[in-house]
Amino acid sequence: MSEVTPVKKVLTLDGRTGEGGGQVVRIAVALAALTGTPIRINNVRGNRAANQRGGGLRAQHVACIKCLADATEAEVTDCFVGSKAFGFKTKLPPEAIKSRNIRVQMDSVASILLVFQATLPFFLFAGDEHGSPITLTIQGGTNVSFSLSFEYLDQVLLPALERFGIKVDRQLENRGWSHGTRQIGSAKFVITPLILGQSLKKPMWPEKRGDIVRIDVSLLIPTQVQGPLTRLLELQLDLIFPGAEVNFRLVEDSKHNARNYALLVAHTSTGLRFGRDWLYGGKTRGKSAEDLATEIASQVTKELDAEVRKGGVVDEYLQDQLVVFQALASGTSSIPRTADARHSSSEREDRMDGSFGDGSF
């Protein structure tokens, strides 16, 4: 069995870089596993230490590190919940994985989708000569705070990744909630990895947003809120996006008054999708169904309108998640979030104002 060529120097990263949150950990570990580069991250989630969520590794970070460590027989140090620094050094390359049926079990509602996000780049390059699929089943949370939801991944992120030639079949087995009575869920992903030696294709992205032609609505809410909220959304979306079809794709009883989630996905005439969602975090006790519906409808429609008005070709959450795949793909690509992104000081500072990629990782 082949092994990763040893890299003598450990790459040391500061977890306070950029936003200084969990994305640094997820991307760094994914790329370390993929390239065989040993890393050590200090000040993990260092910019979170001053707020109520604190710093250090959380359960979903530990889960994705251990998943990739098992796949690559990596040496891992200080990998536990709350750890402020850890090390990761692989022994095996992606194509040497021993199992194509992988389970990640978290005994909490830590985000399934963030674990999936962190491990997908590695498993995409774990192909054999036949392109045999990899089944990844993750237990945890599907609708939790500070994370993308299963619905956003299903309706926005994975359709966007298809432009890179990425194919992932997905199935929600059980829903997992952080609100109300905590409920652990499960999701299954069947990943079609690249055939050994291939790379992701250069994504072809429309240069113009086009007109909004349809809004897909997904609601996970108590039954008593469903009627008022659907009526309000129909009214407000018709006012903001006149002429666009409003399609209630999913209306599901969340089975708890504290569980209120709404996702709006705007589809354009050029084939783009813009998502905006909200997992309601306020107090619901004492609020009428009408008042709660008004608050939710106002929030999600206002934010979707603001996002679309920026004139870019992706929403802000999607852009953050595409960067690693752009870097791994053939050629170079630019996927701006606003019409004037190339003139934005923040975009220039983050080096997002021009094309990049060409398999640079």
Image (cartoon, rainbow, N blue to C red):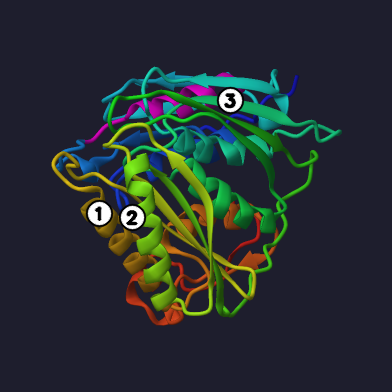
Characterize the magenta stretch by its predominant secondary structure. Answer: helix
* Label 2 sits on residue: 228
Q: For residue 137, which numbered disc appears in the image?
A: 3
Q: Tell me how far mark 2 sits from mark 3, CA to CA.
A: 36 Å
Asked which secondary structure carries label 3, the reply is: strand
Q: Is residue 336 above or below residue 251?
A: below
Q: In the image, which residues are magenta? A: 55-71
- The amino acid at mark 1 is Glu
First in sequence: mark 2 or mark 1?
2
- Which quadrant of the figure contains the N terminus? top right
CB within 8 Å, label 2 to label 1: yes
User: Is residue 306 found left or right of 336 in the rendered image?
Assistant: left
Reply yes or no: does residue 63 show up in magenta: yes
User: Is residue 44 found left or right of 188 in the rendered image?
Assistant: left
Q: Position of residue 178 (x, y in %)?
A: 32, 32
Asked which secondary structure carries label 1, the reply is: helix
Q: Position of residue 278 (x, y in %)?
A: 34, 51
Give the crowd class for mark 1: few <14, some 14-19, many >=20 residues within 10 Å: some
Q: Is residue 184 above or below residue 243?
A: above
